[in-house]
Amino acid sequence: MDKLLKTSFLGKTYPSPLVLASGVLGLTADSMKRVLDAGAGAVTTKSFGLEPRKGHPCPAILPFDGGLINAVGLSNPGVDEMVKEIRKLREQAGSSSGIFASVFGRTHEEFGEVTRRAVEFEPNLIEVNVSCPNVSSEFGTPFGANEMDVEHITRIVKKAAGSIPVSIKLTIHCPSLIRMAKICEENGADAITAINTVGPGMLIDTGVMKPVLANTVGGVSGPAIFPLALKAVYEICGNTRLPVIGTGGVRTADEALQMIMAGARMVSIGSGVYYGDIELFTRINRDLRSWMKERDIKNLKEFRGVVHE
């Protein structure tokens, strides 16, 4: 394992601080294995619930100058099929491979039920998606915007997860992100993932005079939200003791370094794969090593959270 990039997170050690974010290439064992082979320290599955969901109709994902806009709508094959894929990935990549399972529910109780099923394949982490901005027409306001919802779901998932650590994926669309992170901490969360896509936003195709997305509105990700994600990581790391997975618009080693300097323990990459394919993980790992060697830095701890000093 690379001594420079070796990362300890919630009792496990990973070969790199880079993680595949939920929502990208996280549906099949084969695609997730490719990402691990490319240098990711861990992969996060696409968010899954108890039952299969078709999600929103296409077009559901489109690029624009600032990143991507998407309204996939939590499409997934359901927990039964995802358990099969994760077991297959364990067989392909080995028992030490980093696998984070992203779960969601339509109700508080469903979060607990899907978590109980998800822990059957012993993922390294349960990531709790309380903040998808694309399903408000079905689910109402995202749970992540309400303190009572976050408190209740955190408790339910922690109880269902047993010994598996739990990370709550938060949104900046709440009255106070710091307050929300503290609620997660007070109710037993082991980590925070910050942040989910921003919005929803909207773009119009002036040629046909219609919204570009079939769902009209969708979450915004990519370079446009990087400064927002970085500030969120900085604030959470400065106000709680929870380790943070920083995510939102990271495409380069310099942006990954900024996340770590803000305090992130791991750095998650999603939309960046659209711009740089899975070899992005290889390139960022290489550039991180070069940056550290040039400064005679021996490990990530030497500069993690440095801007808080």
Image (cartoon, rainbow, N blue to C red):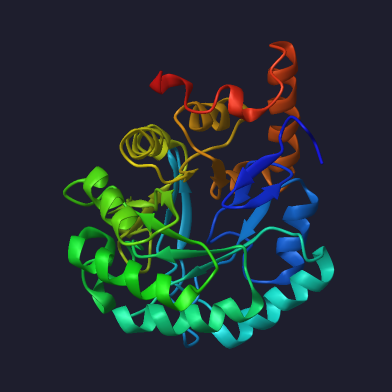
| Residue 78 seen in this snapshot | no
Q: Nearer the viewer, residue 31 or 245?
A: 245
Left or right of 178, for residue 212 = right
| Place of residue 93 in the rendered image (x, y in percent of width and height, measured from the top left) | 81, 63
Quadrant that contains the C terminus: top left
| Residue 176 vertical placement versus 94 (above, below) | above
Residue 276 percent across, percent down from the top left:
66, 41
Q: Residue at x 34, y 38 (%)?
A: 232
Q: Which residue is found at the position 70% from the left and 47% from the top?
A: 14
Name the image quarter holding residue 112.
Answer: bottom left
As drawn, which residue projects farthest toward the left? 175
- Measured from the top left, where is residue 67 in percent x and y? 46, 43
Residue extending farthest to the top is: 295
User: Is 169 in front, or is 121?
Assistant: 121
Query: Is residue 70 in view from this perspective?
Result: yes
Say which quadrant the N terminus sits in.
top right
Total marks in image: 0
Q: Horizontal and vertical percent for residue 239?
A: 30, 37
Q: Is residue 110 above or below residue 291?
A: below
In the displayed structure, would residue 142 be above or below residue 63? Answer: below
Viewer-side residue, 39 vs 219: 39
Which residue shows up at 55% across the image and 42% down it?
A: 267
